[in-house]
Image (tube, grey):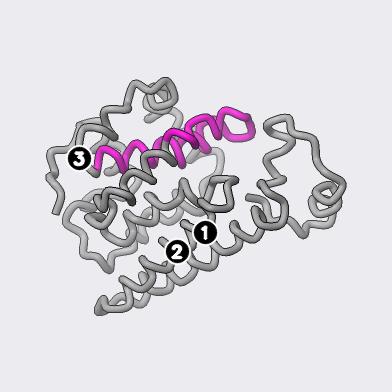
Amino acid sequence: MASLQINPKAQEVLDYWLGEGWQTAPASDTRADRSKIWFQGGPAVDEEITSKFGEYSEALIRGDLDDWHTGGNIYDALAGIIIGDQFCRNIYRGTAKMYAADGRVLSWAKDLVATGRYKELLPIQKQWAILPFMHSEVLADQEECVRLAEEVREETQSLEDADQMKGMMAFFVQYAERHKIIVEKYGRFPHRNAIIGRENTPKETQGLADGSIEGF
């Protein structure tokens, strides 16, 4: 297992996002008590994350937390990915800045995978490390996301008493595939167009109007 000498700020991020006790949780643990924050959210969660971690997100965007990636502790890197890929979406929701850290944390995630350090993480932690691939508008990244998600799903098949985890990772694969389909068809996520000032194509305008384009 990776060293647990984590940067105190990274520890704070992971304790909040993964919940207390994440460091000793078994591989089958879905951290279900955090699912409301992860998947339901809402203004109250956005406000809480902004209050707790707004300064961290600004630091990450500026590059001031790059040592979390280069310092060698995988949990520091994971915390940075969560800030850039998740917290920025809460803090800057509805503005172009919500995507400001995507490129940085995607490069971190790619490095974790390329160096093999990613394999030190538990399944639920890998899910968050994978998400920068899912949020990329590059098809090759989408394909890699599906591959990685399938790999994690396969990893969970050997776990005992892990039906919830297996179900979560099966859904995660499906979710990755749905993102890939959008990028395959449109070359990007059309729902972002209005936020970042891109003009819709006629095909996108129709799909956004009739609801056939998922809101990623």
Start-end of magenta stretch: 75-104
Query: CB atoms at circles 2 and 1 under 8 Å apart?
Result: yes
Element carrying mark 3: loop
Kind of residue at badge 1 = Glu
Element carrying mark 1: helix
Residue ID for mark 1? 143
Per the picture, the main secondary structure of the magenta-coloured stretch is: helix
The answer for how far apart the CA atoms under marks 2 and 1 are is 6 Å
Residue ID for mark 2? 147
Q: Position of residue 17 (x, y in %)?
A: 35, 45
Kind of residue at badge 2 = Arg
Does residue 125 appear left or right of residue 138 in this picture? left
Question: Which is nearer the N-term, disc 3 or disc 1?
Answer: 3
Q: Looking at the image, which is closer to me, 156 or 52?
A: 156
Picture quarter containing residue 147? bottom left
Q: Position of residue 156 (x, y in %)?
A: 32, 72
Does residue 90 appear left or right of residue 196 in this picture? left
Kind of residue at badge 3 = Asn
- For image coordinates 72% across by 45% down, the residue present is 190
The answer for how far apart the CA atoms under marks 3 and 1 are is 27 Å
Residue ID for mark 3? 73
